[in-house]
Image (cartoon, coloured by chain):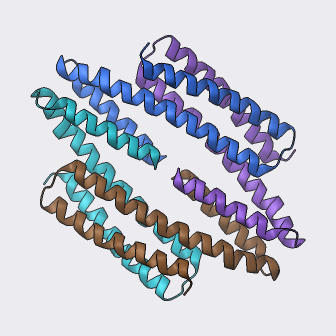
Chain colours: A cyan, B brown, C purple, D blue
Amino acid sequence: MNSEKKKALQSLKTAKGQIEGIIRMIEDERYCMDISNQILAAQSLLKRANLLILEQHLSHCVKDACHNEENADEKINEIITIIEKLMSK
Amino acid sequence: MNSEKKKALQSLKTAKGQIEGIIRMIEDERYCMDISNQILAAQSLLKRANLLILEQHLSHCVKDACHNEENADEKINEIITIIEKLMSK
Amino acid sequence: MNSEKKKALQSLKTAKGQIEGIIRMIEDERYCMDISNQILAAQSLLKRANLLILEQHLSHCVKDACHNEENADEKINEIITIIEKLMSK
Amino acid sequence: MNSEKKKALQSLKTAKGQIEGIIRMIEDERYCMDISNQILAAQSLLKRANLLILEQHLSHCVKDACHNEENADEKINEIITIIEKLMSK
């Protein structure tokens, strides 16, 4: 597993722990704005994980596909789809 | 607990389950774009939970503060801060 | 006109000038990534203008409505709608 | 000029017109929330233009670079940079 994936894993595990904490905060009727801020923090961790995954995908899988002339078009179409999703969020 | 908080709880629990699934996907070296799409789905669930929390906070806590003239300014300043965070994301 | 509105005006005028420049870049078949970066810069200016408008609206109009008990609920409902739009972007 | 660029040009020209309108709205001290909504509409037009530019860049320039083995890596690095910017917005 490459280093980006390891870092992505770490971000996801931290995010999971934060979400468990947010669930408890809601159950404990904690102040709404504190809950909202914690959700924003968890979202940032997910975004970081996704960026790491996409970066290493482009750097390895897409570049390899280009060099080896194997389904490069298909890989690039996938990138177009992800960019569309990122921009519609 | 009001209905919005219950729905937010449900979204968070679903997001937590998805993140557990994504962690396994990375460990199983599943295809990167499938992982990325799953992370985007989990992000949408967190966003939905946050919107529910903010909506009911504004509808109840901020409106009550306005009517009872209790720290209304402070509550509105908190909303300004959250909007700044949302727009800087 | 308050200072936030003046700053928002300045951002919008700068954005307008940038967009005129981007239109020429496309007509001159300039490199796509340079065009994309310029569009992102113009978007940031619009976002800055919008944040300034929302901040001063909350600080003045919404707070005044709370203190004077005039259509405070309506103003807060408008804020909920804007937050929904910001989070669906 | 390809069709995506023509559509992007159209979006940008419409956005420019909207921004001129928003500038007048602020000068005429129009209601803040109406101004904010107009800014959000102009932002959507810029986003649409940017997506069109990126889509045709990937479909033509990046795919060609892959097939002709000309600076494919450089082009893909540019895509990584744009995705980083999109995700940090």
Residue in the picture at 90% in, 71% down? C68
Count all numbered tags in the image, as a single digit: 0
Instruction: Give how far across and how far down residue B38 sits, in percent.
Output: 29, 58
Instruction: Give how far across and how far down residue C37 sits, in percent.
Output: 48, 30
Q: Which residue lies furthest to the top in this view?
A: C28
Q: Residue furthest right?
A: C68
Does D37 appear above or below D3? below
Instruction: Give how far across and how far down residue A54 sits, in percent.
Output: 28, 46
Does D86 appear above or below B12? above
* Residue B79 visible, this orientation: yes
* Residue A40 visible, this orientation: no
Q: Is residue D7 left or right of residue A50?
A: right
Quick one: C42 or D30, which is closer to the camera? Answer: D30
| Quarter of the image that includes the N terminus of chain D | top left
Q: Is residue B56 left or right of residue C2?
A: left
Instruction: Give how far across and how far down residue A41 sits, in percent.
Output: 45, 65
Residue in the picture at 33% in, 43% down? A82
Residue in the picture at 73% in, 66% down? C76
Q: Is residue B85 left or right of residue C57?
A: left
